[in-house]
Amino acid sequence: MSLNKDKIFITGFMGVGKTTVGRYLAKKYGYHFFDLDEEIKKEMNTSLDALLEEKGISFFRKKEEEILPKVCSRSKTVISLGGGTLMSIKNLEYVQGQGVLIFLEGDMSTLQNRLQKSYKRPLLKDIEVSTLQSLYEERKSHYEKADIRIKTTGLSVEDVFQKIEEGFGTLPT
């Protein structure tokens, strides 16, 4: 089986650096970059906080399913997925059929430190930081379906890029 590197998806938990790495990767390859959460905000003309508060998580997940194929319509794209995007089997199967899925994995203590400093994380409004580990565990089996897995703790963006490049070398061509 050959994987299509025309579309590269970045997945992982909140705070792991999906957007930062995705932008860097897109710039290095001359690809377009999309952040799925940002695309939802643009389409809905609202913040994620307001959208989740008004419409709820189920509506948000449906929007992800609707917008994901739209951002995939362009060739040569890097797409940063939301932390929970792959919880939808429809999204997971779609991503797996479109390109290469990269899982960025950070250690929980580093992620907790980053997230505690972040006031723009919609899910953190209603969730205790102590429950992040169980949320991560719930999502982890979906993340692990990725083609490439990168442990990011202690690595710079350039180091993560190098690991991704190495991972591409292990993929079927």
Image: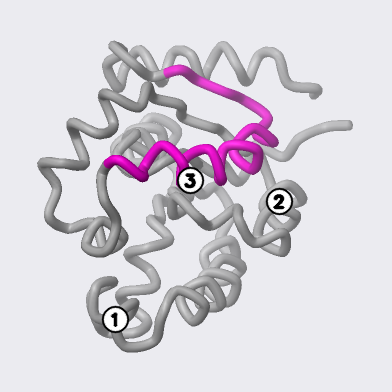
Label placed on residue 53: 1
Q: CA distance from mark 2 to mark 1?
A: 31 Å
Tell me which label, 2 or 1, sits earlier in the chain.
1
Judge the density around disc 1: few (<14), some (14-19), many (≥20) Cα neighbours within 10 Å: few
The answer to whether residue 46 is left or right of residue 35 is left
Residue 89 in the image: x percent, y percent? 72, 59
Residue 78 is tagged as: 3
Which residue does the image show at 44% across and 50% down from the upper left?
83
Which image quadrant is residue 148 in?
top right
Residue range (magenta): 130-151
Q: Which residue is mark 2?
A: 98
Closest to the observer: 120 or 1? 120
| Left or right, 165 with reference to 24 | right
In this view of the protein, which residue sits in the foreground, 128 or 27?
Answer: 128
Which numbered disc, 3 or 1, marks the residue that appears first in the sequence? 1
Residue 18 in the figure: left or right of residue 47: right
Residues at marks 3 and 1, CA–CA distance in whole angstroms: 29 Å
